[in-house]
Amino acid sequence: MMSIRPLAAALVMGLLVSGLLPGSVLAAAPPLVEAPKDGPPRVTVALISDAASIEPGSTFWVGLHQRIASGWHTYWINPGDSGEPPSIEWKLPDGFVAGPIVWPRPERLPVGPFMSFGYEREVVLPIQMTAPASLTIGADVTLRGHASWLVCEKICIPEEADIALSLPVVAGPPAPSTTAPAVEQARRLVPTLSPWAASLSASPETVSIRIAAPGLAAERIAEAWFFPMRWGVIDHAAPQTVAVDRRGITLRSARGQLPQGPASDVDGVLVIQERLDQGPVTQAFTIRAAVGGAATGGSLTLAAAIGLAILGGLILNLMPCVLPVLSIKAIALLSHGHSSPSVVRRHGLAYTVGVLASFSVLAVVLIGLRAGGAEIGWGFQLQSPLVVTALAYVLFALALSLSGLLVIGARLTGLGHGLASRPGYSGTFFTGALATVAATPCTAPFMGAALGFALTQPPFVALAVFEALGLGLALPFLALSLAPTWRRFLPKPGRWMERLRQVLALPLYGSVAWLVWVVSRQAGPEGATLVLAGLVLIALAAWLHHGTRSVSRRWRRAAVALALGCVAAAVALGPIAASSASSAAAAPPRGARWEPFTPERLAELRARGTPVFINATAAWCITCLVNERVALHSPAVADAFARKGVVYLKADWTSKSPKIAALLESFGRSGVPLYVVYGKTLGNPQVLPQVLSERAVIEAVDNL
Amino acid sequence: MRETMSRRHFLTTTGTLILVGQVASTVGPSPLWGAAVAKVGEPAPDFTAPSTKGTPMSLGAYKGKVVVLEWTNHECPYVRKHYETGNMQALQREATGQDVIWLTLISSAKGEQGFVSAAQADELTATRKAAPTAVLLDEKGTVGHLYGATNTPHMYVVDKTGMLVYAGAIDDRPTTRRADVQGATNYVRAALDSVAAGQPVKTPVTRAYGCTVKYS
């Protein structure tokens, strides 16, 4: 006690001498009953402002400046195990409105076995002040209030003081005052709204808080601490263990004194200290943790994930990328109407095995690459222009075959009379594989959540979910082949089948055109041109192979050799096309209503309380493109965005991007599309369905 | 059968491991968490502490009676708010008048704020016109830690069956302002009323407010 008093006195003297507190009244603490009668106050206060004058009708910041004697502390809004936050009773001139205290991030102050949350040495508590429009220019206005606070070292002393600040009324924006830097510094210490979803789960002994903050480097997190805004949820004094992984941060601590777990969302401040090259940087975020872990899609059960995967696979059959491939196979079965039910059944099984086998390959590659640290998800192979080029070639050859310009497709598609004479199960098997490859650009509803879940699970569980998806994809065809009675309803084979085949070539040509566009987005116009040249070479090869069937054997041999040469040349063009680098996707076109997504931009908008719409998309994702056409780019949606001041961020995943992969993962997804709406205030973002309607978007935006 | 056995063995082993892990992760330097701290809805832990009259007193002796535990520190501004307005003494009289046992506990360590000798404690009771059944001295903080008492005042109510039915603040105005005593909702009075009426306590746990208990 004795050592405190001279210190505090010296502090007050210092302040008075240096004249640091203009226009303010020092804490003239009246002789309180509680305080030792002979002691000076432990805290000296002043009311400061960021503006040197007041403009009528304007809003400005004032601050309660506390200078706290060494070893003593004052309190945050949640003081911790004991204590009391400061409060101000305003006595303002008519028309002035004071906002609440905006609390700078607190410090942890262990006192014996207890934990306090508060401030030491010095703190400015910012308050927003609104002036009435009816002020007289040239007059002086005095803002008055009565501040009271508790200051503790080991013992606690309640203190209070009248505060006042006089400012002249001046027309026009005010100049910054001499105390403006202190107010601005304090406002920088106020936590910003977190851009991340958070959830809280409680066991009888522990509490876990999961913050979906992807992309934080574990080795750089020096410290993380969650300060709850209310008492009883978390034991304030218990240590908080921090686990950082690719998907975010998990804090674990002991349960608070409340016997029941929290019934409503828990607000708090997350303070993270990062070790950066230029030294440690501390950031604070306001977090609202949803109770029960419902913040992300990572809470599915295995059974639910498998159910969703089967359903998603079924719907995948109707997607524009799969339908032509499937139709071809259906024709084959149809043309095969005379063969025995057992042969048809075997074809069905061969197709299913083909789908499942290719899904296994896909899953093993995907899981393996992810285990190696690659930031990839569903449809990842289409991020490579090489794969897109190969897919374009294969679909083009298939289309030529359906047009009757090429017969090598017979085996691949199981078409024509070859099937009647030979079982051709291998052809059916590869149709299954082809269906899988063609399906990857599409995300059907329900799939996203299931695959997102799968990729967070151990490899075998992930594989099971992938196989369930394959099973769903194969199911309609398998069902048809197992129940031969359906064939009674089909017309007899004839010329109509030939025509249908030719017509079905057209969606395939369309798919090729789309894939060329995808390459143009990934590798620029040069790359796309090379792929088009490759397609011409394939057409030439097809003609050489098909159109020279009746010539002499010598010429035929030469033609086939030449055709193979054409194919080889086309294949060689692929890597060259892929290597033409492009930054096509980065910049939005002139007049676009969207901005490219970056985590920094999102954090900045969230910090300002600006509502945000995120569209995670890719040129190779047909579902995404359909959604953009049908729902996102309509004038009504643009109006809704404008009405609510929503900033539209586009996360284009056409080419690889770890930042976008991390964004997807933070929502428990592994692929596009993903649509997220952030409101103005604290709270978890809303995830919209993967098949989007104009109404769904407008409703979500209007509800902000 | 062998399979069942091995599975059971597996479950027990993992269960034990998890338990050990949890205990290991929660036991630390502070006795307030991890250690067996009194919980509302569970039997109140028994204790024995010397009274200012020199006789050891234990909670177990009062089975069949309602007991109020009050942690205090006469120098704490929050405690002074309730004593200098007569609020605490009125509640003590009201309770003891209804055959409730009121034990005031002082857990301040020697040399810390609020530490008093038996004689000083009795003098405080006399000068403040307090009316507890007894004042118990807990300078080692044993009882305080057993109950997880963090603040002064920190209030507990034990019912006739020995169950802890209330823990927390005296009322809902966490300030040092004397004027706030008027119109506050007194949680201890509400808990005593519920217990007397044979009803469950409506607000069984609240945030205790005040000064930290000055443990050593």
Image (spheres, helix red, strand yellow):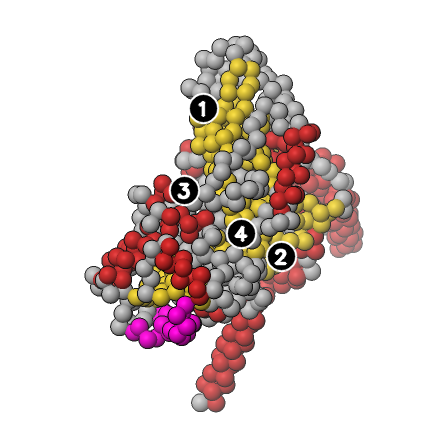
Of the image marks 2 and 1, the number of the one nearer the N terminus: 1
Q: Quadrant of the N terminus of chain B?
A: bottom left
- Mark 4 to mark 2 CA distance (whole Å): 42 Å
Q: Quadrant of the C terminus of chain B?
A: bottom right
Q: Residue at x 32, y 69 (%)?
A: B163
CB of mark 4 within 8 Å of CB of mark 2? no
> Along the polypeptide, which appears first: circle 1 or circle 4?
1
- Look at the picture and state if A698 lies above or below A54: below
Query: Disc 3 versus disc 1: distance between alpha carbons?
Result: 22 Å
Comparing labels 2 and 1, the label whose residue is closer to the camera: 1
Q: Which mark is residue A572?
A: none
Which mark identifies residue A92?
1
Give the CA separation, mark 1 to mark 4.
Answer: 33 Å
Q: Is residue A322 visible?
A: no
Q: Which residue is mark 4?
A: A155
Residue type pointed to by label 2: Asp
Task: Answer few, some or many: residues within 10 Å of disc 4's Cα (few below 14, many 20 plus, some between 14 and 19).
Answer: some
Residue A358 screen position, x and y as percent: 59, 61
Residue found at x 66% / y 43%: A7
Residue at horizontal 68 percent and vertical 53 percent from the top: A222
Using the numbered discs, state the Cα–Cα distance from disc 2 to disc 3 in whole angstroms.
48 Å
Q: Kindly report the distance in space between the C-alpha atoms of the residues bearing marks 3 and 4.
A: 17 Å
Choose between A403 and B38: the one closer to the eye: B38
Q: Which is more foreground, mark 2 or mark 3? A: 3
Q: Which chain letter matches label 4?
A: A
- The answer to whether residue A109 is visible is yes
